[in-house]
Amino acid sequence: MPIEVELVLRLLLAAFLAGAIGLEREVRDQPAGFRTHMLVSLGACLFAVISAYGWQPLVDDNPDVLIRVDPTRIAAQIVTGIGFLGAGAILRSGMSVRGLTTAASLWVVAAIGTAVGLGSYIVGTATAVIALLTLMFLRPLRQRLVRGIKPDHEEYVVRAGPELQLERLIADVSAAHLRVDSLRIDEEDGGEREIQLLLRIPTTQRPEDAAGVLARTPGVRNVDWTR
């Protein structure tokens, strides 16, 4: 059995690696950020340590007692339990679903914590590095690749006054070679309206261009778009 100091260092390493991933999520204003990722990995690491070594003092005190330990059972329960926490990070916002990547990162940091807790330092660290590279650098690469192959879909939230003519808004969108795939209107007091638009952006245009088209329509007071 490793000494207690080494086990504490495993807990610290698991928290550090997960914190790096959580910081990237925090910067992007995701529902689960720095502290959440650290706690998930720390808890998974502690479960792994207890599963692998928690019974050792009992064995040492009772050498005549036969105890069978299966660390894989705890690992299996961690995989199952983290699914519920990951599901809580998935949010439906208007006509789109957000948080899938954050849920996946929570699942990964739980695996990192388990690996470090069982002594697989190199594997756990390598997984953390790969996860960070995936989150930080593959997003812009994915946008370039996908937009070069097929039109992209973006959601915009338009706040407009009563003077806005919906037909004019749709006409401006169509004139800019944009396609409305979904539209939702919420009426508010004083004739104010919140319009949620899911637009198909052709590969020759940028999402910023579509936001500009919407903002120039008479009656539009504000356009919200999250990149």
Image (tube, helix red, strand yellow):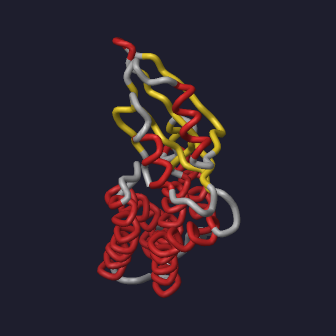
User: Along the horizontal axis of the image, is 49 left or right of 111?
Assistant: left
User: Along the horizontal axis of the image, is 133 left or right of 183?
Assistant: left
Instruction: Say whether residue 208 is visible.
Output: yes
> What residue do we see at 46% from left, 84% from top?
121
**133 shown above or below 225:** below
**118 shown above or below 214:** below
Residue at the extreme top: 190
> What residue do we see at 40% from left, 16% from top?
188
Image quarter in which the N terminus is found: bottom left
Q: Which of 61 and 44 is in front in this view?
A: 44
Q: Where is residue 49 in the image (x, y as percent from the top left)?
A: 45, 70
Q: Nearer the viewer, residue 95 or 160?
A: 160
**85 shown above or below 160:** below
Q: Position of residue 19 (x, y in %)?
A: 35, 67
Q: Where is residue 106 in the image (x, y as percent from the top left)?
A: 49, 59
**175 shown above or below 138:** above
User: Along the horizontal axis of the image, is 82 left or right of 163?
Assistant: right
Q: Which of 169 and 82 is in front in this view?
A: 169
Instruction: Say whether residue 117 is visible.
Output: no
Q: In which quarter of the image is residue 41?
A: bottom left
Image quarter in which the C terminus is found: bottom left
Residue at the extreme left: 5
Q: Which of 137 and 199 is in front in this view?
A: 199
Residue at the extreme right: 149
> What residue do we see at 58% from left, 51% from top?
83
Q: Position of residue 72 (x, y in %)?
A: 62, 67
> What residue do we see at 61% from left, 47% from top?
178
